[in-house]
Amino acid sequence: MFAHTLTATALGLALSCLAGAALACPDVSQNGAYGRFTGQQLYEAKFFSVTAGGDFPIRARCKGIYNALRSERGEGFFPVRPDFTLETPGLAGFTLVISVVSDCDSALLINTPAGNWYYDDDDNGNLDARIDLTAPSSGVLDIWVGTADGEYCDAQLRLETF
């Protein structure tokens, strides 16, 4: 009886650890710092201070997100909660550029209003990330600012339309 109870307890603990690992991925049901900007308002760049980094490597622990990426793939370490939740009415006809400037190897992960995932590591130069959405849809966009190596650093998120 004791052995069965111990085995059941160990199994329960193992399953809860696995469930916790699955939950430790970027989560679109959570919100980050909130902003609401139209395409016209973002024609003048907006800047936001963030901390780049996170504890959860998307390639190793978040296969659902990693396999759904519609862009390049990389390791990237991100937090669970988005750094920024952007409501974007009126983006038709604009290109939305999301970029990071930091003192570390930053990475970007975004989930668009259409539910598409995008990742970038170095397209902004100087080991910083940049994603250009050439036909963005209006709605809620979640943005995670991570790092390629799991480190943390101060960073600046830039949002701009063209």
Image (tube, rainbow, N blue to C red):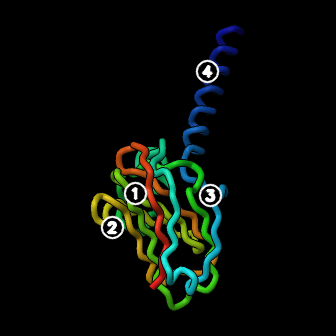
Q: Which residue is mark 3?
A: 32
Label 2 or label 3, whichever comes before in sequence order: 3
Query: Residue, x 65% and y 58% (percent of image)?
Result: 31
> Which of the two labelled residues, at mark 1 and mark 2, occupies the earlier sequence position?
1
For mark 1, give the secondary structure: strand
Mark 4 or 1 closer to N-term?
4
Q: Determine the CA span between mark 1 and mark 3.
A: 17 Å
Check whether the beta carbons of the residues at disc 1 and disc 3 lie within 8 A of each other.
no
Query: Which one is in front in this view, the residue at disc 1 or the one at disc 2?
Result: 2
Check disc 4 and give the amino acid type: Ala
**Which corner quadrant holds the C terminus?**
bottom left
Secondary structure at numbered mark 4: helix
* Residue indicated by mark 4: 10
Which badge, 4 or 2, comes first in the chain's sequence?
4
| Label annotation for residue 27 | none
| Name of the residue lying farthest toward the bottom | 93
| Amino acid residing under circle 3 | Gly
Query: Mark 2 highlights which residue?
Result: 124
Q: Mark 3 or mark 4, which has the lower sequence index?
A: 4
Residue at the (47%, 63%) spot, across then down:
157
Residue 13, visible in the rendered structure? yes
The residue at the point 61 percent across, 21 percent down is: 10
Classify mark 2: residues with Cα within 10 Å, few (<14), some (14-19) or many (20+): some
Instruction: Tell me the CA gap for discs 1 and 2.
Output: 10 Å
Foreground pick, 158 / 132: 158
Residue pointed to by mark 1:
107
